[in-house]
């Protein structure tokens, strides 16, 4: 007959072996996980990490290609001082504010109106819901060049049709006249970016319980009061997220406004993103261009932090 003490000791040995094997398996799984992440870390380091570090380094150095490729010298905050002393800085910041605010809120406002219409019973609603997504399917470069052709003073379709209906007697320079410049740019931005906002807002509208709307109508609520007191408060989180995302995207947008106007006429539509390109690759001042890019990145990080806080709040 086996002694109870021997059985207990054998059980303890078995438990120790199982614990050792379990810990070893966990350690192997952790090592395997890190090994699988190595390619991703290398990719992120090469594509994001190195350019970011190099941009920070350039922003602290005086480096003009016109002085030679070996002319890079450390100068501290000289590039940032040069930027803030730029006599045209006020124009750049004003243009940036007009672009960011207009390209963010106009698409959201238009998408909200359109989504409210499409949320109702309309004949052929499925067709119209599909048609409004066409601008979203077009590449930004294609959109910008198409609108540039539409606005063309000599051959543009807009001038042609305005003359045909008698609204103008001579062609208008939509991209050269200061009065029409920013309305023309923001019209393109609204057309280009409203479909994304429209899809998000329409999904939020369809998530509102029908019973809530029916109860409001029974109580004598008008259509306007229904939108103001029920619809808008219900979709407020979506509208807020779209606003923050729009601010981030428009803040860093380069392609649309540069292909449409190239920052002109003069500097009347130059924003910070095209300014980085012009300073770096047209004036060959890589140090100052990197400094402008760092300022733009810091502003974008602020909006990014706000967005992450909002996402965490939504998860709770």
Image (cartoon, rainbow, N blue to C red):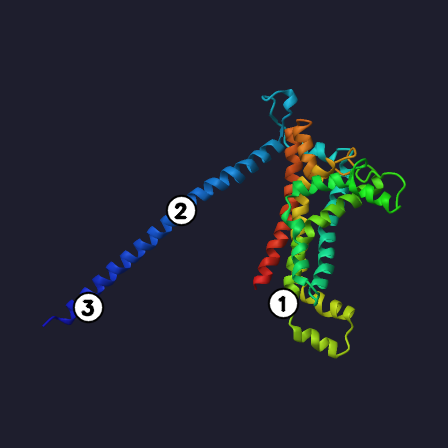
* Labels 1 and 2 touching (C-beta < 8 A): no
- Disc on the earlier residue, 1 or 2: 2
Residue drawn at 74 percent across, 52 percent down: 106
87 or 155: nearer the eye? 155
Residue under numbered circle 3 = 8
Per the rendering, the mark at residue 36 is 2
How many marks can you see?
A: 3
Secondary structure under badge 3?
helix
Q: Residue at x 62, y 33 (%)?
A: 59
Label 2: element kind: helix
Check disc 1: other Cα within 10 Å, few if <14, some if 14-19, many if 20+: few
Rendering coords of residue 135 (x, y %)? 67, 49
Horizontal side, residue 208 vs residue 157: left or right: left
Within-10-Å neighbours for mark 3: few <14, some 14–19, many 20+: few
Residue placed under numbered mark 1 in the picture = 207
Q: Which of marks 3 and 1 precedes in the sequence?
A: 3
Q: Residue at x 86, y 43 (%)?
A: 163
- In front: label 2 or label 3: 2
Asked if one can make out residue 78 in the rendered structure from this viewpoint, the answer is no
User: 235 or 135, which lies in front?
Assistant: 135
């Amino acid at each position: 007959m086996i002694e109870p003490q021997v059985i207990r000791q054998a059980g303890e040995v078995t438990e120790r072996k199982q614990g050792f094997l379990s810990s070893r398996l966990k350690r192997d799984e952790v090592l395997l996980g890190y090994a699988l992440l190595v390619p991703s870390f290398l990719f992120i380091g090469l594509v994001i990490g190195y350019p970011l570090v190099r941009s920070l380094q350039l922003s602290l150095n005086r480096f003009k290609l016109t002085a030679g490729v070996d002319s890079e010298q450390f100068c501290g905050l000289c590039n940032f001082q040069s930027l803030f002393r730029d006599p045209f800085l006020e124009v750049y910041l004003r243009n940036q504010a007009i672009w960011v605010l207009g390209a963010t809120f106009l698409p959201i406002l238009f998408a909200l109106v359109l989504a409210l219409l499409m949320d109702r019973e309309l004949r052929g609603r499925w067709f119209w819901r599909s048609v409004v997504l066409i601008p979203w399917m077009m590449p930004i470069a294609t959109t910008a060049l198409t609108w540039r052709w539409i606005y063309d003073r000599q051959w543009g379709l807009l001038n042609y049709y305005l003359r045909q209906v008698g609204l103008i007697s001579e062609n208008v320079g939509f991209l050269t006249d200061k009065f029409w410049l920013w309305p023309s740019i923001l019209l393109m931005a609204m057309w280009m970016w409203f479909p994304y906002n429209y899809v998000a807002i329409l999904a939020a509208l369809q998530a509102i319980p029908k019973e809530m709307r029916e109860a409001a109508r029974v109580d004598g609520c008008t259509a306007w009061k229904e939108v103001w007191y029920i619809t808008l408060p219900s979709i407020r989180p979506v509208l807020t997220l779209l606003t923050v995302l729009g601010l981030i995207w428009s803040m860093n947008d380069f392609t649309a406004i540069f292909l449409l106007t190239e920052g002109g006429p003069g500097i009347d539509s130059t924003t910070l993103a095209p300014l980085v390109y012009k300073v770096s690759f047209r004036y060959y001042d890589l140090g100052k261009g990197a400094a402008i890019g760092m300022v733009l990145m810091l502003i974008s990080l602020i909006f990014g932090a706000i967005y992450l806080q909002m996402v965490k709040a939504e998860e709770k």
